[in-house]
Image: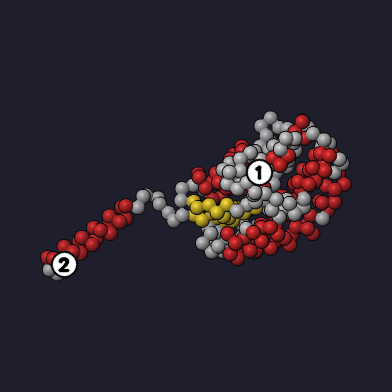
């Protein structure tokens, strides 16, 4: 090899080393994160909806918090207040692609009209309606959840999918935040939350989907409405939409941490 060609070869090796050294240590490809779901994912209850007033998406919602906490995470935030499984399939699922690496979702509560039930509890007696909803829970939700989960897995076969559950809303004691809701109704509403948790968890972790399920029952257990450190809003007569949804702490210390234990 001539002196000139040897020198060129050495310069080529040096150039390659400089390119490698220019990449920060620990740098990795960006994670494409899609946040699907209903009001528990959009951020209802946090009081700020600057990302979407119609869907009530805000910067204090757990998906946005996670995207800010994790370097190289690109968020497609499509969760929307009031969404049912049908709404998700019609308006949100398109955001999930083969390049999606992380998906989070809360869905199912609006399919059983949970918010309407709590309003009924506040205004009148809801005990029979809660019993009826619990009895028909599996019939109402199983196939709908299967449809959503199959679509997510088919469209993002390699994604880490975290399905999040709903908490028990009420503690053992009542207060102004549970105005109009009797002890019996609070107990039955919590039983419905437990049954919903069981059903969603069973479907999410089915081998067909291989999702990770994060129950909210444990993390929120000491932070229900009327607790000394609530992560959920109680009844807000001046803004009823905020009622019975996770507050800012419920999103940051609750749901965001639940997701971070899975995705890092």
Tell me what residue is drawn at x 73 percent, y 62 percent.
143
Which residue in the rendered view is the most extreme toward the bottom? 1
SS under mark 1? loop
- Residue hosting label 1: 44
Residue 102 drawn at (x, y percent): 55, 55
Q: Is residue 162 visible?
A: no
Q: Is residue 9 visible?
A: yes
Tell me if 30 is positioned left or right of 6 in this view. right
Residue 205 drawn at (x, y percent): 65, 57
Residue 5 circle label: 2
Tell me what residue is drawn at x 69 percent, y 40 percent.
242
Crowd around label 1: few <14 · some 14–19 · many ≥20 (10 Å)? many
106 up-or-down from 232: above or below: below
Residue 38 drawn at (x, y percent): 67, 51
Q: Tag count in the figure?
A: 2
Q: Nearer the viewer, residue 247 or 90?
A: 90
Alpha carbon distance from label 1 to label 2: 66 Å
Crowd around label 2: few <14 · some 14–19 · many ≥20 (10 Å)? few
- Dividing the picture into quadrants, the one containing residue 111 is bottom right
Marks 1 & 2, CB-CB < 8 Å contact: no
Tell me what residue is drawn at x 12 percent, y 65 percent.
3
Q: Nearer the viewer, residue 74 or 186?
A: 74
Q: Nearer the viewer, residue 259 or 175?
A: 175
- Dividing the picture into quadrants, the one containing residue 94 is bottom right
Residue 122 drawn at (x, y percent): 81, 39
């Amino acid at each position: 090899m001539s002196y000139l060609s040897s020198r060129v070869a050495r310069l080529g090796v040096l150039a390659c080393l400089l390119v490698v050294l220019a990449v920060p240590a620990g740098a990795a490809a960006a994670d494409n994160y899609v946040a699907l779901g209903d009001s528990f994912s959009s951020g209802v209850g946090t009081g700020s909806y600057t990302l979407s007033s119609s869907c009530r998406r805000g910067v204090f919602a757990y998906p946005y918090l996670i995207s800010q906490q994790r370097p190289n995470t690109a968020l497609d935030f499509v969760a929307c207040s009031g969404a049912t499984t049908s709404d998700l399939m019609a308006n949100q699922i398109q955001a999930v692609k083969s390049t999606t690496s992380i998906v989070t979702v809360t869905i199912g509560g609006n399919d059983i009209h949970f918010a309407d039930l709590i309003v009924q509890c506040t205004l009148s007696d809801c005990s029979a309606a809660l019993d009826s909803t619990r009895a028909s829970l599996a019939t109402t939700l199983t196939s709908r959840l299967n449809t959503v989960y199959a679509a997510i897995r088919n469209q993002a076969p390699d994604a880490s999918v975290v399905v999040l559950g709903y908490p028990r809303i009420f503690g053992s004691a009542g207060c102004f935040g549970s105005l109009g809701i009797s002890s019996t109704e609070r107990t039955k509403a919590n039983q419905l939350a437990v049954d919903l948790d069981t059903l969603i968890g069973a479907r999410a972790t089915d081998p067909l989907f291989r999702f990770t399920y994060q129950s909210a029952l444990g993390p929120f257990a000491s932070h229900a409405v009327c607790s000394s450190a609530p992560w959920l809003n109680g009844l807000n007569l001046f803004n009823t939409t905020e009622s019975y949804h996770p507050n800012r702490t419920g999103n940051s210390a609750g749901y965001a941490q639940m997701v971070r234990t899975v995705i890092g």
